[in-house]
Image: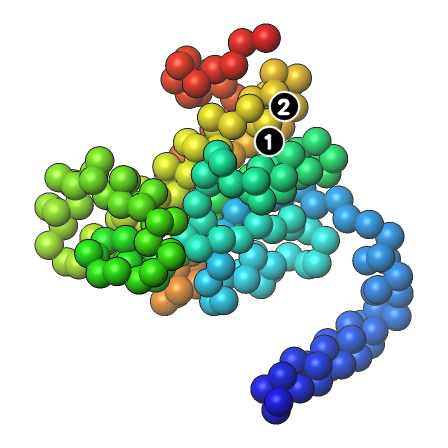
Amino acid sequence: MKLYKELLDGNKVFVKEALEKDPDYFKKLSKGQAPKYLWIGCSDSRVPANQITNTQPGDVFVHRNISNLVINTDMNLLSVLEYAIKFIKVKHIIVCGHYGCGGVLAAMSNKQHGLIDNWLSNIKDIYRENEEELLAIEDEKKRGERLVELNVTRQVQNLCKISIIQDAWKEGQFPTVNGWVYGLEDGIIKDLKVSVGGTDEISSIYHFLT
């Protein structure tokens, strides 16, 4: 019960400090949101989108799941994606993984973890396709870090195959899709430089013709 109450007490502190800085803070916030960014990140509690990018509530539209996966049958993600593009009209979508990701590390092993193993099989596919490169990395920590990067890159590619994004591109709209990795040990975000801004940047087999 004490831990539960700590959250409510923390909320009171948050409200007090926000109002001290700006008496109209919540009035302004309640008028609506117009974020320029959609963040697809990991559920890990150590990677809060606003805090690590020094942005404010209302600046970033956020979707999170274990190991920041983009799966084209995930109705939750597809609903967020459509809303962000069609109604909020975000300019950038950022897939952000993080080094030391428990889901990625679990996918590297043969240990059974439960229901999550079905979700993580998507990362095992990435491992299998890049096995030669990964096994050449002797340091297990560095191997895991490389798989984190490969996972983010794959999720960027997966996003670009989704019709919702391609429809926006056909209409000459944004978004640009970007891939980042956050370092838990130093707090630095690494841009993997795998950004995609149109169908001409992906294989033609994935193009949707009108």
Disc 1 marks which amino acid? Answer: Pro
Horizontal and vertical percent position of residue 33: 77, 48
Mark 2 or mark 1, earlier in chain: 2
Please report the residue visible at 70 percent of the width from the left and 58 percent of the height from the top. 57
Determine whether, in the image, residue 84 is placed left or right of residue 26.
left
Which residue of the protein is positioned furthest toward the top in this rendering? 210
- Residue drawn at the location 81% of the way across and 58% of the way down: 29
Residue 8, position as x, y percentages in the image:
70, 81
Q: Nearer the viewer, residue 180 or 40?
A: 40
Q: CA distance from mark 2 to mark 1?
A: 8 Å
Q: Residue at x 42, y 39 (%)?
A: 155
Q: SS of the residue at dot 1?
A: loop
Instruction: Name the amino acid, label 2.
Output: Ala
Which residue is disc 1 drawn over? 175
In this image, 108 relative to 82: left or right? left
Which residue: 83% across, 65% down? 25
**Residue with the mark numbered 2:** 168
